[in-house]
Amino acid sequence: MAINRLQKLRPIISQKDLDALLVSQLENYRYLSGFAGSTGWLIISNSHTILATDSRYTEQAKQEAQGFEVIQIRGELDNWLPGLASDLQWHKLGFEANHLSFAAHHKLSETIKAKQLKLELIPLVNLVERLRSIKEPAELELIIKAVELTDAAFEQVKATIRPGVTEKEVAWEIESFLRQNGSEGVAFDLIVASGPNSALPHAQPTERILHHGEAVLIDMGARIGGYCSDFSRTLCLGKELEAASSQLAAIYSAVLEAQLTAIDKIESGMTAAQADQLARRVIEQAGYGDAFGHGLGHGVGIAIHELPTLSPTSADLLTDSMVFTVEPGVYIAGLGGVRIEDVVTLEKGRAKVLTKSKKDSFQL
Ligand code: ZN
């Protein structure tokens, strides 16, 4: 598996005219090597495949990172990397500019200068992330399992969601269901936001009690075999709509139409900005353009948020075998918010929806 991925990476390293690439980002080194420890670096050249980690992780690394030469390091990058690069006669080393801290880069540069090494550090972005955005069949299978688990959790929790329970109680119900049914923890801190709290796109569950006629926004993710799912639904409790909830019902229809339109019209070959626009136009026409503050969606994989980024400014190109969310939302301060989120994959040029939970009605 990892060997396959390295074969995709190595031509890119050559194209960039690098002697080697330093991979420091956790999901990226996990993807390339299989090593799931929390501290590690890969150094990949045409002839070397090195995994550097400290004594806490060397045994784990040897087991997980098949085909990698595991070296045990001490201290920070500047302590061991310049010596290694010099031994292997590397002069141009790429690094992940989005992830290596300014402090680490600064110390490394100072050490290279002090030792008078001819080693140039080349900043690069998204090399491994772009590979990760195209899913292999085995990765897609794991994501589907995680999606199925969030669907099942939603089905289960619907019975708990009623006036009188708190957001925290609902959140705990979901979390225990996910964990009891095979999720490796939760993919992120889950959201249960009721009434005005639902207007905060990333609200935290509180002691607030759920009431009739209000929106309840649920956003959760499971993790199976290291791969995430991401799921949102918004519900309204009770059949008798109050004045506030009739506006919420109108917002719900607009968000749903935007989501369905995007799913129907998204095609491989589009930019992610064009995909975002499909949904945004519907919400703008309904009069809520200003209240849709975030992008339409994001890739899902080893990380809960990865490429492609579906937003008005994204230049990412959508292609077959990508997996991402479609999750338009409208948030009105003081009233509440609505978000509907499914995970889709691009297959034969079109979006195939992996999430199965119903979304046609705002009423629970
Ligand atoms: Zn999401």
Image (spheres, helix red, strand yellow):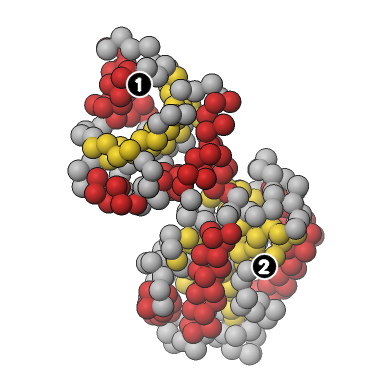
| Position of residue 171 measured from the top left corner of the image (x, y, whole percent) | 42, 75
Q: Check the image and report above or below for 235 versus 160.
A: above
- Local packing at callout 1 (Cα closer than 10 Å; few below 14, some 14-19, many 20+) is few
**Do we see residue 104 in this rendering?**
yes
- Horizontally, residue 188 falls left or right of residue 139, namely left
Residue at 36%, 26% (x, y): give it: 105
- The amino acid type, in three-letter code, at marker 1 is Leu
Mark 2 C-beta closer than 8 Å to ligand 1: no
Q: Which residue is mark 1?
A: 88
**Closer-to-camera residue (237/312):** 312
Q: Is residue 238 left or right of residue 60?
A: right
Q: Secondary structure at mark 2?
A: strand
Nearer the camera: disc 1 or disc 2: 1
Look at 65% across and 74% down and name the residue there: 248
Q: Can you identify the residue that label 2 sits on?
A: 353
**Placement of 5 over or under 261, stated as above or below:** above
In the shown orientation, is residue 20 left or right of residue 125? Answer: left
- Measured in 3D between alpha carbons, the distance from the residue under mark 1 to the one under mark 2, in whole angstroms, is 48 Å
Quarter of the image where one finds residue 253:
bottom right
Q: Please name the amino acid that badge 2 sits on.
A: Val
First in residue order: circle 1 vs circle 2: 1
